[in-house]
Amino acid sequence: MMWGPWMGFGGLWMLLVVVGIVLLVVWAARGASGDASGGSTSPNRALDILDERFARGEIDEEEYRKRRRLLEGS
């Protein structure tokens, strides 16, 4: 058998695969935790979005007040 200088590259590739999997898991976990990349929104962020939609004219004042009351829990 001819092992030669290429023998060490198998271990290197395995290490790179493991590191890649770990990075993928960390990236997926951060995305699911609700940080800036998406996920769940906090009540304050939901109110900010509602304010933005009203300011852009996407919803009228009645709809704005109704949704604001729902988000504030009143």
Image: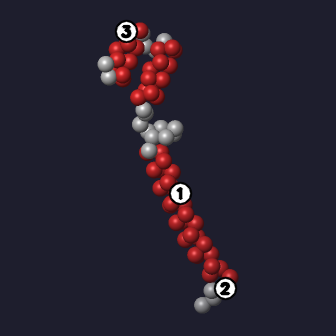
Judge the density around disc 1: few (<14), some (14-19), many (≥20) Cα neighbours within 10 Å: few
Q: Residue at x 47, y 50 (%)?
A: 28
Amino acid type at circle 2 is Gly
Residue tagged by mark 3? 62
Amino acid type at circle 1 is Leu
Q: Earlier in the sequence, mark 3 or mark 2?
A: 2
Left or right of 16, for residue 70: left
Amino acid type at circle 3 is Glu
Left or right of 11, for residue 48: left
Q: Earlier in the sequence, mark 1 or mark 3?
A: 1
Residue 27 x, y percent position in the rendering: 51, 51
Q: Residue at x 68, y 82 (%)?
A: 5
Residue tagged by mark 2? 4
Cα distance between the residues tagged 1 and 3: 47 Å
Residue 23's disc number: 1
Instruction: Please tell me whether residue 13 is drawn above or below residue 72 in the rendered image.
Output: below
Mark 2 vs mark 1: in front: 1
The outermost residue toward the bottom is 1
Q: Secondary structure at mark 3?
A: helix
Q: Residue at x 47, y 38 (%)?
A: 38
Q: Residue at x 38, y 18 (%)?
A: 68
Residue 6 x, y percent position in the rendering: 65, 79
Residue 52 x, y percent position in the rendering: 50, 19
